[in-house]
Image: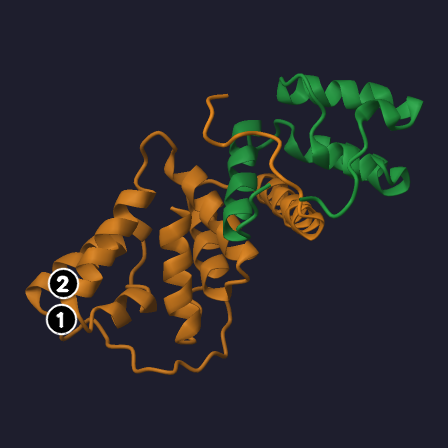
Chain colours: A orange, B green
Amino acid sequence: MAGTTHALNAVADGLRLPLEFGNSSRDPLVAVPNTVEASPELKAVFDEIRTFYAMDRVPAVFRWMARDAIFLQGYWSAVRAAFTAASLDRLTKEVLALAASMTAKSDYGVDLHLREARRLGLTDQGLTEAVEVVQLFNTVTKIADALQLQPDFNPRSEP
Amino acid sequence: MEIVRIPEARELAPEDQPFLEATKGWFKIDFVPKMSRVLLSHPEFGRPYGRASRRAMSDGALSRAQKEMIAATVSAINVCEY
């Protein structure tokens, strides 16, 4: 989940794609295709994306990937698998994606995942708590790195 | 290796010992993590920061487990081994 989020953000922010929900003055570095002329195969993927996010349009990052159908299909399949409810529910996954996006300073990711987390039920209090933990651990990780703290636990051992 | 000496818990101020003990209980471990010891070696920073941390990680609108996963995600994105 953190990996696919980071990758999606890298594409969207790297290409300066406009934000999907917030005000955005970003000028994309590439032409972003519309969905009208998509092949039937791509249309099916686009429909799935719109349904997954409950949006009436396809986010620009996926439309840009649709320049290469195999690229889009492969990446979308991975995103769908990562974000579908399993051991973790979908809201928790969106909150984690929001935390990953904030930490990586991704405007596109924060915009997309904040909207999605709210749509799935994140309250203002829940958002405040999530941001508090993001703040806390962005502090802690920097202190740990600066002091070169070695782990307290062996990450390969069972708890 | 660490670039500062990490004090043992017993070297820290007597008034911080209850918090240090509580930290072991919080994590269900039999030692005090290095981060807690380092922070409390500067009590004027470590005390309020420790209290804020405990509050931030407690169950609320989000569960403690969800908050720990957020912490792990931030650590992963920041590539922080600790």
Residue A154's x, y, as percent? Answer: 53, 30
Q: Residues within 10 Å of mark 2 (few under 14, many from 20)?
A: some
Q: Position of residue B71 (x, y in %)?
A: 57, 40
Q: Position of residue A66 (x, y in %)?
A: 20, 69
Answer yes or no: are tags 1 and 2 on the same subunit: yes
Neighbourhood count class around disc 1 (C-alpha, 10 Å): few under 14, some 14–19, many 20 upward? some
Look at label 1 and name its amino acid: Ala
Q: Which mark is residue A38?
A: 1
Name the residue located 58 percent from the left edge and 42 percent from the top edge.
Answer: A130
Q: Is residue A42 left or right of residue A129?
A: left
Residue pushed farthest front? B1
Which residue lies at the image location 39% right of the left edge and 76% below the top edge? A15
Give me the chain letter of mark 2.
A
Quarter of the figure with the N terminus of chain B? top right
Q: Which residue is mark 2?
A: A43
- Res. B82 image quadrant: top right
Circle 1/circle 2 CB separation < 8 Å: yes
- Image-based side of B21 in relation to A124, left or right: right
Query: What amino acid is found at the position of numbered circle 2 in the picture?
Result: Lys
Residue A17 in view in this figure: no
Relative depth, front residue between A143 and A12: A143
State the separation of the CA atoms marked 1 and 2: 6 Å
Q: Position of residue B15 (x, y in %)?
A: 92, 23
Label 2's element?
helix
Q: Looking at the image, can residue A15 be seen?
A: yes
The residue sitting at 33% across, 64% down in the picture is A59
Q: Is residue B65 above or below residue B42?
A: above
